[in-house]
Image (spheres, grey):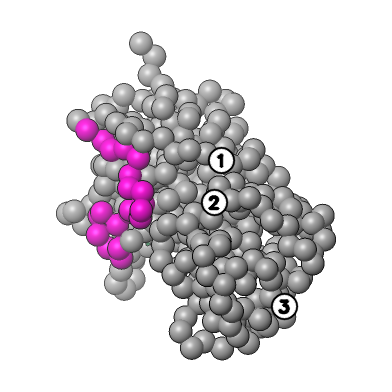
Amino acid sequence: MKKPTVTVISLGGTISCTPAIAGDGVVPTLGAADLVLSLGTASDVDIQPFTWSTRDSSEITFAELVDLAAEVRKQFDAGSQGVVLTQGTDTIDESAFALDLLLGIKHPIVITGALHNPSQSKSDGPANLQAALQVAVSPELRDIGTVVVMNDEIHAAQWVRKSHTSNSAAFQSPGVGPIGWIAENRPVFALKPIHSRQAPIHDATGAGNVAFITAVMDDTPTIVDSILSLGYKGLVVDGMGGGHVSGGFSEALAKAAQSIPVVYASRTGSGSVLQSTYSSPGAEVDLINHGLIPAGSLPGLKARILLTLLIRSGATHTEIADAFAAHGRYLSRPAHHLNPESNYA
Ligand code: GLU
């Protein structure tokens, strides 16, 4: 029987690292073909290696992810049955969700990496890549979308988070858990995310960056004015608890929300932001009345990804509010003082 073809696209990161020629530490140097070689010769899949870049994942940009998504679609159209992406683990929680939004469930990919580089005895790259290949050819993935496979666990892009600096088990999905795992070299899918998202955001080729701030005790709200003056097109605030800020911060955010979309999430990292429980200055009722958009169940980092791609695709304020409402199962309430048709590109 013909083996399924899987494209392995490499972007650098620890899985690609080798000792630096001068000095201490390691740097990404290996390409996709090198990573495939680390698996040995026997494989259930026919692997097409594709070296995209050899960089740290801190260098990945939205523009690059839009191009990468186009390449992934091209690989599927050319006959690949699956696509695996290897990259540095520092930003997997962000790039996975961006690619999930850009590709939708029709072109799902599997992202993996390593916490320990190939020169270390506990190097986890080959095992992670092997597991990712097995997941990439699973028919179940067509209903799920982009996933992250690390340490024999399968995590949905929407929930996964790097939760440890250096442990092989660094990836978790707080409040949800992995949606599956690898058992005896086979993927087992236990859960299927309920998707309430709209169509994939294909055309996010516009400009515009979204600022991300965490609300902290006794901070000065002037930071919000600085964000406006720096030209950001949107703002995500990782609020305290259910999505709260101080009263002074709320006033500054209200001013910002007159000109750019402002989304509030929760710095707790799991659960949904509140929408109708507290009404003190800076609590959710106050924030919504000032035109802020609840992130729903999306953690702040993921909310920034969604807002950036929406702004870059020219979405109107109503479309932005609706997209977040879909993630929170909330009714979208257009801010009364904003033009619902305005966009921010
Ligand atoms: N510099 C790495 C990165 O590109 C470190 C983390 C890793 O790959 O595990 O994210």
Could you tell me the amino acid type at mark 3? Lys
In the image, residue 28 sits, relative to residue 218, either above or below, namely above
Q: Residue at x 74, y 53 (%)?
A: 318
Residue sitting farthest toward the left: 121
> In the image shown, does 1 or 109 lie closer to the viewer?
109
- Residue on which the image places disc 3: 255
Q: Real-space Cα distance between discs 1 and 2?
A: 9 Å
Can I make out residue 48 in this image? no
Residue 259 falls inside the magenta stretch: no
> In the image shown, does 331 or 232 lie closer to the viewer?
331
Q: Is 247 situated left or right of 86 in this image?
A: right
Range drawn in magenta? 164-183
Residue 245, x across and y down, in percent: 53, 77
- Residue on which the image places disc 2: 328
Q: Ligand 1 is found in which quarter of the picture?
A: bottom left
Q: Real-space Cα distance between discs 2 and 3?
A: 24 Å
Can I make out residue 182 in this image? yes
Q: Does the magenta stretch mainly form a helix, a strand or a loop? A: loop
- Which quarter of the rendering shows the C terminus? bottom right
Q: Residues within 10 Å of mark 1 (few under 14, many from 20)?
A: few
> In the image shown, does 170 or 253 lie closer to the viewer?
253
Residue 195, x across and y down, in percent: 52, 39
* Quarter where residue 117 is shown: bottom left
Q: Real-space Cα distance between discs 3 and 1?
A: 31 Å
In the image, residue 23 sits, relative to residue 306, either above or below, namely below
* Quarter where residue 291 is shown: bottom right
Residue 12, x across and y down, in percent: 43, 53
Q: Residue at x 53, y 34 (%)?
A: 105
- Which quarter of the rendering shows the N terminus? top left
* Disc 3 element: helix
- Residue on which the image places disc 1: 196
Task: Of the two numbered discs 1 and 2 on the same chain, state the one appearing first in sequence.
Answer: 1
